[in-house]
Image: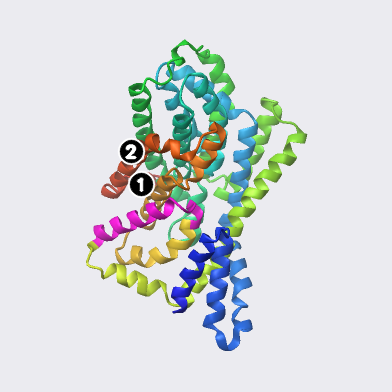
């Protein structure tokens, strides 16, 4: 009964408009108090303990740093220079700007681990450029929102950091390596329908007449941005620094590029950047810590084992259970952000993963692909919210354009399920 109340209270608070972090914490605290009815105040001591325990994990230090990296590279003009270089490479023509938007979003995924931050950085440059070329705002917002979803697959990824904290046996470097190939496949899969739709509907009529940036000049300007993922990922692979230390190195590298090389930032710009990053990091980490209370109440009430047992003994079989989880998480992904999904569902799914002996790294990539799909699935898609705000369009107008791109990324997820080595080959090759 208390376990039922836990979920009813959580869902009820959500429908009342309570922020998800507060809903998790309040529902968990109420369940803990009811479970210790004889000594409520003593039982509630578990609330502050688990609030801290949810937050006091070394890998989580990387999150505010990577969020800060995203803000710095957004303000430093790196995205604009990468766009100019990409246009210089692929040229002008119908469908080329959507291709560039997706390619640049994939590349920025190797700098910042936040999908909404990526959507803001790419959207700020690309949506205006696509509008000048004759692309409808709803289409531009759809492309940018979908492209930014690759961010949580291509390392560094905030989602992988959260997953590594929740799942023993899945290290951050192994997850980063495992996400690389599926992330690139997802980006390529998005390019195909984006270019096809642009050409089929005659979009971008003015694009061919727009000037093409000179190749060598745009390459020189983009070099510092191009070097960032090499520094971050190469440094981790060479053993120079851990993922958390890599985030700090990336911050100082971004500041050097913005203030010394491009000179698009000054000391005065640091305060709004730090404030913006601090607010976003605080929201993420507060949800993480409050979810620790919810997870504790789940485990102490004995909810996890019966739910896992019921799913395992449902008669669906291994692939039937996997299909059920895909349907569940994509549906949930329409309404919750990726970090919240991981924090709520990974403790429930862990026994199922262990029962079927699924590789924890491969399973993490599959879950992240589902979350990536949710990030641009209306009605509550965090990436689409950002890109629609920049484009000045309503989210409902993006549905017709988002559909084919959702299908393309879904097919990539099916491929990774059918061929696990797409995710596991690179970690094994690198010795993780």
Q: Is residue 305 visible?
A: yes
Which corner quadrant holds the N terminus? bottom left
User: Which mark, residue 151?
Assistant: none
Q: Judging from the image, what secondary structure is the residue with disc 2 in? A: helix
Foreground pick, 79 / 111: 79
Q: Is residue 242 visible?
A: no
User: Which mark, residue 423?
Assistant: 1
Residue ID at (38%, 52%): 330
Tell me where the magenta segment starts and ends, as one range.
318-340
Residue ID at (63%, 43%): 68
- Number of numbered discs: 2
The overriding secondary structure of the stretch rendered in magenta is: helix
Q: Quadrant of residue 191?
A: top left
Give the labeled residue for mark 2: 408
Foreground pick, 159 / 244: 159
Residue ID at (29%, 63%): 356
Query: In the rendering, at what x and y percent does residue 12 appear?
Result: 50, 65
Foreground pick, 297 / 84: 297
Query: In the rendering, at what x and y percent does residue 115 appear?
Result: 51, 42
Q: Quadrant of residue 40?
A: bottom right
Whether 399 is drawn above or below 320: the answer is: above
Marks 2 and 1 sit apart, C-alpha to C-alpha, by 18 Å
Residue ID at (35%, 21%): 199
Q: Which residue is at the far bottom?
A: 38
């Amino acid at each position: 009964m208390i376990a039922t109340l836990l979920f009813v209270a959580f869902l009820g608070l959500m429908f009342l408009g309570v922020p998800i972090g507060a809903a998790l914490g309040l529902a968990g605290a109420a369940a803990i108090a009811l479970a210790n009815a004889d000594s409520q105040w003593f039982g509630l001591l578990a609330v502050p303990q688990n609030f801290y325990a949810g937050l006091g994990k070394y890998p989580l230090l990387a999150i505010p740093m990577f969020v800060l990296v995203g803000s710095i590279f957004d303000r430093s003009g790196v995205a604009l220079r990468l766009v100019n270089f990409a246009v210089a490479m692929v040229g002008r023509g119908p469908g080329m700007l959507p291709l560039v938007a997706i390619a640049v979003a994939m590349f920025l995924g190797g700098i910042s681990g936040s999908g909404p931050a990526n959507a803001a950085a790419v959207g700020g440059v690309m949506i205006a450029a696509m509008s000048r070329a004759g692309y409808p705002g709803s289409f531009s917002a759809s492309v940018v929102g979908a492209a930014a979803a690759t961010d949580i697959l291509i390392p560094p990824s905030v989602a992988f950091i959260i997953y590594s904290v929740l799942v023993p046996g899945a290290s951050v470097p192994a997850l980063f390596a495992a996400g690389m190939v599926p992330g690139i496949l997802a980006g390529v899969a998005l390019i195909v329908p984006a270019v096809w739709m642009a050409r089929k509907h005659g979009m971008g009529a003015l694009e061919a007449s727009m000037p093409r940036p000179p190749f060598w000049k745009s390459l020189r300007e983009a070099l510092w941005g191009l070097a960032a993922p090499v520094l971050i990922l190469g440094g981790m692979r060479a053993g120079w620094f851990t993922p958390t230390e890599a985030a700090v190195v990336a911050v100082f590298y971004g500041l050097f590029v913005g203030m010394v090389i491009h000179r698009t930032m000054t000391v005065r710009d640091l305060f709004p950047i730090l404030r913006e990053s601090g607010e976003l990091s605080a929201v993420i980490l507060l949800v993480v810590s409050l979810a620790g209370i919810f997870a504790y109440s789940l485990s102490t009430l004995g909810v996890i084992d019966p739910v896992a047992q019921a799913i395992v003994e449902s008669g669906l079989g291994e692939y039937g259970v996997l299909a059920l989880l895909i349907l569940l998480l994509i549906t949930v992904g329409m309404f919750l952000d990726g970090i919240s999904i991981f924090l709520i569902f990974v403790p429930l799914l862990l026994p199922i993963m262990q029962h079927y002996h699924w590789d924890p790294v491969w399973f993490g990539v599959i879950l992240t692909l589902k979350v990536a799909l949710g990030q641009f699935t209306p009605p509550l898609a965090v990436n689409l919210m950002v890109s629609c705000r920049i484009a000045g369009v309503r989210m409902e107008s993006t549905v017709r354009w988002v559909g084919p791109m959702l299908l393309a990324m879904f097919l990539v997820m099916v491929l990774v399920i059918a061929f696990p080595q797409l995710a596991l080959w690179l970690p094994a090759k690198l010795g993780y």
